[in-house]
Image: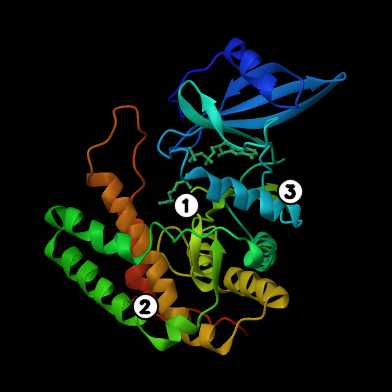
Amino acid sequence: MAVFTSVSLDDVRTWIAQFPLGDAVALKGIASGIENSNFFLTTEQNGRRTEYVLTIFENLGFEQLPFYLQLMRHLASRGVLVPEPVPNRDGELCVPLQGKPAAIVSKLEGGSQMAPQPVHCAAVGDMLAKMHLAGRDFPLHQPNLRGIAWWHATAPEVFPHLSERETALLRSEIHYQEAFHGSDLYRRLQQGPVHADLFRNNVMFDGNRLTGFFDFYFAGCDTWLFDVAVTVNDWCVDLDTGVLDEPRVRAMLDAYHAVRPFTHDEQTGWQCTLRAAALRFWLSRLYDLYRPRAAEMLTPHDPTHFERILRERIATPAPGLSA
Ligand SMILES: Nc1ncnc2c1ncn2[C@@H]1O[C@H](COP(=O)(O)OP(=O)(O)O)[C@@H](O)[C@H]1O
Ligand SMILES: N[C@@H](CCOP(=O)(O)O)C(=O)O
């Protein structure tokens, strides 16, 4: 159950007076999610009921949240389908609740599509390209906090837990990625705000209609290509083998390319970037598995899934960026 901080409807009734949303009439904890406490919040104003999502941030502090919340606001104002944060009467997007930072955002319709078909991948590719373009004039900057600096800092913490075979792979891949990240080619890749965690469970669909991207709390500035690679590695993969499913890859990449054409440099850097995206989640899953965990945290995700994907991306070239 992902409600780590308990809040009652009475608590919220008083707290919500600072927002121009009317009265709080219902509050329901959301079971899924592993980072924050999330609730569906219903408000009533002039006889009209509206549903929102109330998030209490368990790990992020007040100083870190403006980047994420302002980014969502910026994207929403440019027509990208993302939850829109609601400012309070003082214009603040993030305010304390039970002593922790909290925010209210609009609720997306629908549910997650956990068995995506090419039609869903195309919708994700199209919206991802629109999101990258819309982020070009976003004024705030924060690096991807799960980028190469984090890999360097984190690998030594997991090495003691790994087999020789795993250690060899992790060492050699970080070494390989250092060379790629230090190259002229890498410096020429287009960069901007990216979601950086656009997995199947972070996108809503109503049937085949995409209704939004959410969970922006790993977002940061990185190459657009990295975002594409993270997304392909999750949406277009055979979950048992880590092998990419070509029809889904083609649907996603072609839809992206139709909105924001890939560059020649991106074509060249594509295979390395798919490996970087696999490495990022292998390492974070290893770290989550081996670090001391708070008692209430849920079962960590399986790291071997991304180890398999990384080995597969090294062994087999993925379909190219354009057909
Ligand atoms: N804006 C939203 N609209 C609709 N549902 C949402 C929204 N934000 C979160 N949810 C629901 O809450 C669940 C947990 O959210 P998530 O952001 O993944 O949590 P966590 O950050 O704790 O991993 C999601 O799976 C989804 O069902
Ligand atoms: N997508 C990551 C974990 C992040 O969890 P989320 O529920 O906040 O998206 C992974 O699968 O390792």
Image height of 227 relative to 28, above or below = below
Q: Which mark is residue 30?
A: none
The residue pinned by badge 3 equals: 207
The residue lying at 24 percent from left, 76 percent from top is 175
Q: CA distance from mark 1 to mark 3?
A: 27 Å
The residue pinned by badge 1 equals: 218
Relative side of 118 to 168, left or right: right
Q: Amino acid at mark 1?
A: Phe
Q: CA distance from mark 1 to mark 2?
A: 20 Å
Ligand 1 lies under 8 Å from the Cβ of mark 3: no
Q: x, y (%) of residue 322?
A: 61, 83
The answer to the question of whether label 1 and label 2 lie on touching residues, with beta carbons closer than 8 A, is no
Relative side of 173 to 316, left or right: left
The local crowd at label 2, few if under 14, some if 14 to 19, many if 20 or more residues have their Cα within 10 Å, is: some
Q: Is residue 148 something one can see in this rendering?
A: yes
Q: Which mark is residue 181?
A: 2
Where disc 3 sits, the SS reads loop
Answer with mark 1 or mark 3, whichever residue precedes in sequence: 3
Image height of 120 relative to 287, above or below = below
Ligand 2 lies under 8 Å from the Cβ of mark 1: yes
Q: CA distance from mark 2 to mark 3?
A: 39 Å
